[in-house]
Amino acid sequence: MKRRLQRYIGVIYRPESELHSHYLEASLPQQYEAFLWFDETFPVTPLQKEQGGGAAEMFPTGL
């Protein structure tokens, strides 16, 4: 039940206001029904191979 700092997702990084604008106090048992923690993660693998072009052509939304 202890309230802890929870970091927002998708915020713009501003070091001068990091703590004040990027975190909120939260009690996980009061806010969520379940909480998952992954000690290790891996990058996703594309379903299809890239066809020609490159990352520059796809930025920011291509596969």
Image: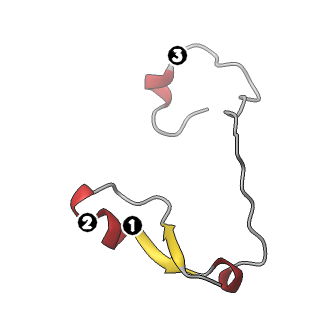
Of labels 1 and 3, earlier in sequence is: 1
User: What amino acid is at disc 2?
Assistant: Ser
* Residue 13 locus on image (x, y percent): 33, 54
User: Badge 1: how crowded within 10 Å, few (<14), some, or many (20+)?
Assistant: some
Residue 17 tag number: 2
Residue 53 tag number: 3
Of labels 1 and 2, earlier in sequence is: 2
User: What amino acid is at disc 3?
Assistant: Gly
Closer-to-camera residue (12/16)? 16
Q: Which residue does the image show at 65% across and 77% down from the upper left?
A: 28
Q: Which residue does the image show at 68% across and 86% down from the upper left?
A: 30
Q: Where is the C terminus found, in terms of image quarters?
A: top right
Of labels 3 and 2, earlier in sequence is: 2
User: What amino acid is at disc 1?
Assistant: His
Q: Which residue does the image show at 70% across and 34% down from the upper left?
A: 42
Q: CA distance from mark 3 to mark 2?
A: 39 Å
User: Badge 2: how crowded within 10 Å, few (<14), some, or many (20+)?
Assistant: few
Q: Is residue 52 above or below residue 7?
A: above
Residue farthest to the front, as pictured: 2
Say whether marks 1 and 2 touch (CB < 8 Å). Answer: yes
Q: Nearer the viewer, mark 1 or mark 3?
A: 1
Q: Is residue 33 left or right of residue 5?
A: right
Q: In which quadrant of the rendered view does residue 27 lie? A: bottom right
Q: CA distance from mark 1 to mark 3?
A: 37 Å
Number of numbered callouts drawn: 3
Closer-to-camera residue (41/50)? 41
* Residue 61 locus on image (x, y percent): 52, 40
Disc 1 marks which residue? 22
Closer-to-camera residue (17/39)? 39
Q: Is residue 52 above or below residue 38?
A: above
Q: Where is the N terminus found, in terms of image quarters?
A: bottom right
Residue farthest to the top, as pictured: 52
